[in-house]
Amino acid sequence: MGILKERHNLSDYLYWSSFGLIPLLLACFAIAQYSMKWVLIYIIVFAGHFLILEYRFFCTHCPHYCNDSPTTNCMFLWGVPKFFKRRSYPLSKIDIFMLVLGFSITIFFPLYWLLKSWQLCIIYFLSWIVLFITMKRYECPRCIYLHCPANSVEESIKKEFMNRSI
C-alpha cells in the first residue's frame, strides 16, 4: 500500500460511520427489548465516548485534527468543531488509558442485555472484531497519524513522510 492517506473525504466518513453503526444498532436492539431508558443511556454513553473522551484524548493528537481547518474531517468525525486544544505530540499514558477505558465501557456496557440472546451477542462482538480488523488492514497501513498505537505504516514510508513534512 505505500501511499499515505493525507485527507479523508465525506465518503470515507459515511463508510466508516455506517460500519461503526452496526454494533451500536445491535446493542440498542438487544437493550430495547427490555428498556428504552437504557437504550437512551447507552446512546449517550456511546456518543460521549466518541465526542468527548476519544475526541479529547486521542483525536487532538491526530494530524487531521491539528491542521488549520476549523472542523475535524476524518473517517469517524466529519464537520465537528475543534473545541479542544491541538496536541501535536505522541499520546501520553493517560491518553491511552482514557481511550481504552472509553472503548471498554462502550463495548461492554450492553453485555447484560446481549447475553440474554447469545445470537445477538455473537453478532455484536463479531461486528466489533470485523470493524477493528478492517481498520487495521485498510486504514492503519496508510494513516498519517504516525503516533497512533495502531499505526502500521512501514518505517521507510514514515521516514519519507516525516522528511517531506519538515
Image: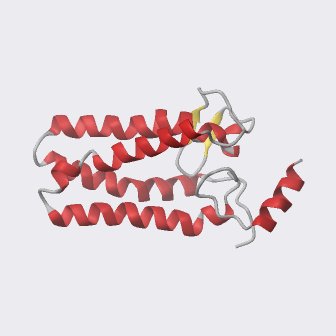
In this figure, what is the number of numbered marks?
0
For the point 49% across and 41% down, the residue is 97
Left or right: where 47 falls relative to 9: left
Residue nearest the viewer, comparing 82 with 92: 92
Left or right: where 129 falls relative to 154: left
For the point 60% across and 27% down, the residue is 84
Q: Position of residue 102 (x, y in %)?
A: 41, 41
Give the quadrant of residue 89.
top right
Give the quadrant of residue 23.
bottom left
Q: Quadrant of the N terminus?
A: bottom right
Q: How is the image coloured?
A: secondary structure
Residue nearest the viewer, comparing 76 with 122: 122
Report the residue that reaches farthest toward the bottom: 1
For the point 11% across and 49% down, the residue is 33
Left or right: where 155 falls relative to 106: right
Q: Position of residue 81 (x, y in %)?
A: 59, 31
Q: Position of residue 85 (x, y in %)?
A: 65, 27
For the point 59% across and 41% down, the residue is 59
Left or right: where 100 falls relative to 119: right
Up the image or down, 31 lies above or below 125; here it is above
Q: Position of residue 136 (x, y in %)?
A: 55, 65
